[in-house]
Structures are given as C-alpha cells and as structure tokens.
Image: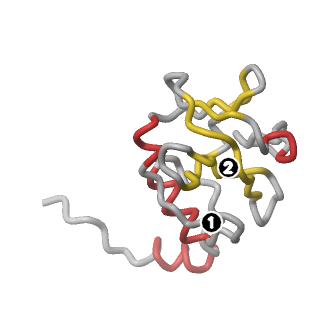
Amino acid sequence: MEGPVRTDIDPRNLIGRKAFDRDGSRIGTVDEVYLDDATGVPEWAAIRTGLFSRDAFVPLEPSELVDGALRVPFDRALIKEAPDFGVGRHLSPEQELQLYHHYGLDVAAAPPPPDHDFGKLAGKGKGPDEG
C-alpha cells in the first residue's frame, strides 16, 4: 500500500480540533470525519464554521496537524464555497467527486474502469483530428 494517504491521522483525535486555512485564519472546528468506504482511511472533514453557519467539507489528504490544529492548505473563500451536503450522512461517490473538483484535486483515488471497457475504448482506432 502506497500513496499520499494520511493514514497517520486518527479521526477520533481530529473531532473538536480547531481548523485553519492556508493563511492561518481560523475556519472553525472539526465537526465530523468521513472515512473512505474501501480503505477506512480518513478522507474528508466537516468543519463547523461560525461565520458560514454550516459545515464546510475539506480534504484531509493534503491537510496536516500543526500544533494540535488542522491546517487546511486552501484559501478561506474556496473552503467557504465548498458544496454543502449536510453532516451525519454518507457522502456518495458523486458528492466526493464534486468536492475533489471543487478543490482541484486529482481524482486518482477513484477506482479505475474495468480493463475490458478500457480495452474497447483504446481499440476503437479513431484518433483525434490532427489536421
């Protein structure tokens, strides 16, 4: 198992911690942690924001614990505009995809398409028009 997954973050230790954006401005407090369905690795945190009176979903993989707080390497405005799916419910693959796109993250963590489908696509023989 390899990759940039933050397996060292224990979700139970994150809840209740303060969260800050990349400039060190406080965003709020970690309200909930969402685990990846397949691996059980913490993937998203819902930050309870006082200013926005809702939870903002942030990705845990590029975030880090600094001096006991969660440092999210994104701008406060981007975090504020993250899709709001409500807390206490399961994040669907479509919702996760929306969050990945919102933060401009690589979606390489998604399962690859089945080989036979990929082979059919690759074997079509029609390339892009280069004329």
Question: Which of the numbered marks, if any, corresponds to residue 98?
Answer: none
Disc number lying in front (1 or 2): 2
Circle 2 SS class? strand
Query: In the image as oriented, which residue stretches furthest toward the top?
Result: 67
Q: Position of residue 5 (x, y in %)?
A: 73, 43
Q: Amino acid at mark 2?
A: Ala
Q: Which residue is mark 2?
A: 45
Identify the residue at image location x=56%, y=36%.
Answer: 27
Q: In which quadrant of the rendered view does residue 24 lie?
A: top right
**Between residues 96 and 129, which one lies in front from this camera angle?**
96
Identify the residue at image location x=47%, y=71%.
Answer: 122
Left or right: where does residue 74 sit relative to residue 1? Answer: left
Q: Amino acid at mark 1?
A: Pro
Q: Position of residue 72 (x, y in %)?
A: 59, 34
Circle 1 SS class? loop
Name the quarter where the C terminus is drawn: bottom left
Q: Residues within 10 Å of mark 1 (few under 14, many from 20)?
A: few
Left or right: where does residue 108 sit relative to residue 83? Answer: right
**Between residues 37 and 51, which one lies in front from this camera angle?**
51
**Between residues 9 and 122, which one lies in front from this camera angle?**
9
Query: In the image as oriented, which residue stretches furthest toward the left?
Result: 131
Q: Position of residue 65 (x, y in %)?
A: 73, 29
C-alpha span from label 1 to label 2: 25 Å
**Between residues 51 and 115, which one lies in front from this camera angle?**
51
Q: Which residue is mark 1?
A: 112
Q: Position of residue 103 (x, y in %)?
A: 47, 47
